[in-house]
């Protein structure tokens, strides 16, 4: 990364925080990058993988560099889903012997999941942890505006509403609303969800 280019980027789509070049030096930077002269300055970034399982099909979405949002298409509607954190080699059910695994039902405004690169963006604005090592493969998740009911284990739900997922685990979202949508790195790439669809999220992109 040679520096941000917030004043020369398209602010309708992005702040350009990871831009390697700007309009002013593009003709100079691109040939040097092609010749390999800038390899030492280029940072590799980890991405997150999203797979959507419907009743009749399975769709692998483009890897996300920053974050994804799983939510109802209307910001005024409640997003209902079950959130599981599971081992990659498990039997699709949380193990009572593994404190890193859990499953609980959620009524909220949706779910953010971000890479370390995305931790300084919307995840930080939503109240997440922005002090994440960019070289880590861990994912961060945050339930938006969680509605905690009277009969819920409040301490458990509050504790599990925000956390991290390492390489040995993944998140599974079972969508329980009639309509939903998964947004990949903003609103330009999205996939519609129906009742019963599953969204699998991992660091293995």
Image (spheres, rainbow, N blue to C red):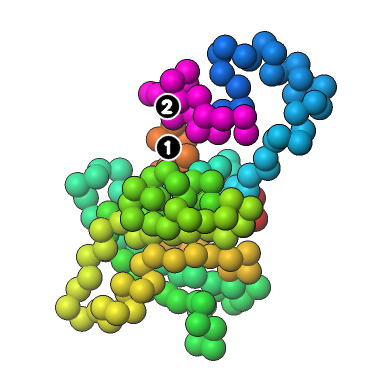
Which residue does the image show at 36% across and 74% down from the upper left?
159
Which residue does the image show at 38% across and 72% down from the upper left?
160
Q: Which mark is residue 186?
A: 1
| Secondary structure at numbered mark 1 | loop
The residue beneath circle 2 is: 13
Could you tell me how far apart the alpha carbons at marks 1 and 2 are, in whole angstroms? 8 Å
Marks 1 and 2, the one that precedes in the sequence: 2
Q: Position of residue 111 (x, y in %)?
A: 37, 55
**Position of 11 compared to 18: left or right?**
left
Nearer the observer, 58 or 144:
144
| Secondary structure at numbered mark 2 | loop
Q: Position of residue 167 (x, y in %)?
A: 63, 64
**Quarter of the rendering containing residue 154:** bottom left
Q: Are marks 1 and 2 in contact (CB under 8 Å)?
A: yes
Part of the protein shown in magenta: 1-18
**Residue 172 falls within the magenta-colored stretch:** no
Q: Please count the marks in the image.
A: 2
Position above or below: 194 against 33? below
Mark 2 crowdedness (10 Å alpha carbons): few <14, some 14-19, many ≥20: few
Nearer the observer, 79 or 38:
38
Position above or below: 59 against 148? above
């Amino acid at each position: 990364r040679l520096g941000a280019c917030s004043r020369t980027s398209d602010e309708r789509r992005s702040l350009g925080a990871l831009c390697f070049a700007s309009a002013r030096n593009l003709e100079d930077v691109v040939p040097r990058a092609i010749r390999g002269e800038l390899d030492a300055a280029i940072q590799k970034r980890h991405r997150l993988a999203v797979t959507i399982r419907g009743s009749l099909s399975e769709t692998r979405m483009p890897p996300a560099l920053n974050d994804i949002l799983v939510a109802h298409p209307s910001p005024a509607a409640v997003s209902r889903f079950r959130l599981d954190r599971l081992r990659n080699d498990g039997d699709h059910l949380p193990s009572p012997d593994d404190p890193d695994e859990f499953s609980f039902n959620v009524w909220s405004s949706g779910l953010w999941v971000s890479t370390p690169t995305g931790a300084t963006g919307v995840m930080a604005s939503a109240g997440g942890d922005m002090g994440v090592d960019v070289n880590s493969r861990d994912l961060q998740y945050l339930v938006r505006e969680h509605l905690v009911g009277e009969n819920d284990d409040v301490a458990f739900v509050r504790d599990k509403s925000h956390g991290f997922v390492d390489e040995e685990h993944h998140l599974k979202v079972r969508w329980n609303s009639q309509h939903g949508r998964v947004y990949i790195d903003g609103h330009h790439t999205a996939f519609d969800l129906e009742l019963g669809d599953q969204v699998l999220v991992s660091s293995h992109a």
